[in-house]
Image (cartoon, rainbow, N blue to C red):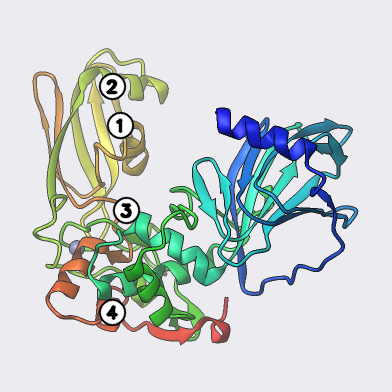
Amino acid sequence: MKPLLFTFLFLMACPAFCADEGNISAATETVRIGLAQSIKEVVVEMKGISVVTDIESGRKFRSTKPSLYRVKPGGEGKTEMAGKILGPELRIMPIEGQERVRFNGKEYRGGVYIKLNKDQTLTVIEEVGLEEYLYGVLPLEMGPNWPLEALKAQAVVARTYTLTQLKRFSDSGYDLSADVKSQVYGGSTYDYPAVLEAVRSTAGEVLTYKGKLVEAYYHAACGGHTTSPLWDDDVIKPLRGVFCKFCRSSPNYKWTVTVSNSKVLDYLQSRGLSARKVTGIKSVKKNRSGRTLLLKFTTDKGSKTLDAKEFRTVMGNTQVKSTYFTSIQRKKDGFRIYGQGYGHGAGMCQDGASEMAKRGRKYKQILEFYYPDSEISDWRDADK
Ligand SMILES: [Zn+2]
């Protein structure tokens, strides 16, 4: 904390932090990523020359020295930064090409917006180019050391997914969140050569079906069959699910987990059952791919049928890795669940994509396999 405090004091005394009338050209093809919300104070660090814009008044302030910006609510719908009372929205932007904005231990190459909310908390948003955004998604959603053709398939899929999710969080002022609710995004903290190559060599490419963007879901491992999303019947051909033999060597191809009696009981009680003992759990409805949709719980006080996806979430998505249950057995200490795959199972199976790439398949073949009948188009031509 010491060096940060020092830089902050330095900024306060720094005559270089002054009004700036220069222009910052607006980037095109950008996405807005929510980096943090409902926080009381924002601390952002810059190494080189940066400009802070007060969006409401249009006033700009330039700092030519390493700076630490500390922003907090300033009362009456205003923000406060370095002793100045400013408008409800600020943008901090590096103006040197390679410079990054640092926030919460990560670095960002785009402009960082700090917005005041009605409840006197702050939201932090990065506005970044679509392609640059993908540089920060692939390392976390797949991995920088994965085979190049798998990374290229992932780049197309993540780009497509991003464009189908724009405005999802528009109430909060951004398009996508930087966590699992959208896609995990680490900013430009690391620029891995293979990731940059995968994104650049597929620049602008998206998956379409009959000219329209495909909702390009993806997941870690399918366990033998990918699934359509829940709205089974009217789903388009590329998302209906395919038989996949490529993830058989995945550590998540098959798994078992034991959920304790007390955890299951707590869950049932929270759903209105006054049971004291759970005697059985049975899969009573499956979709075409074999995923369980509904589970029936039998207890000393009757039975109840509940949503399998919800059960998985409550038990823990990292323990109960999917709803692709093959067997559920009653044991002394709880229920042993045997399952396959990791994740929701829709769209591309990443472990399968990796295996296909290792066997020499190109990214277009991988995409054709997991999204049958889809086409690769330039995103500017696709119906959104
Ligand atoms: Zn698979």
Q: What element carries label 2?
A: helix
Q: Earlier in the sequence, mark 4 or mark 1?
A: 1
- State how far apart marks 1 and 3 are (Cα): 15 Å
Q: CB under 8 Å between callouts 3 and 2?
A: no
The residue pinned by badge 1 equals 315
Give the position of the N terminus as an image quadrant: top right
Q: Where is residue 21 in the image (x, y as percent from the top left)?
A: 87, 63
Q: Earlier in the sequence, mark 1 or mark 3?
A: 1
Residue 175 seen? yes
Q: Which residue lies furthest to the top in this view?
A: 276
Neighbor class of circle 4 (other Cα within 10 Å; few <14, some 14-19, many 20+) is: many
Residue 272 seen? no
Q: In which quarter of the image is ligand 1?
A: bottom left
Residue at point 74%, 72% (across, down): 25
- State how far apart marks 4 and 3 are (Cα): 22 Å
At label 3, the amino acid type is: His
At label 2, the amino acid type is: Lys
The label shown at residue 344 is 3
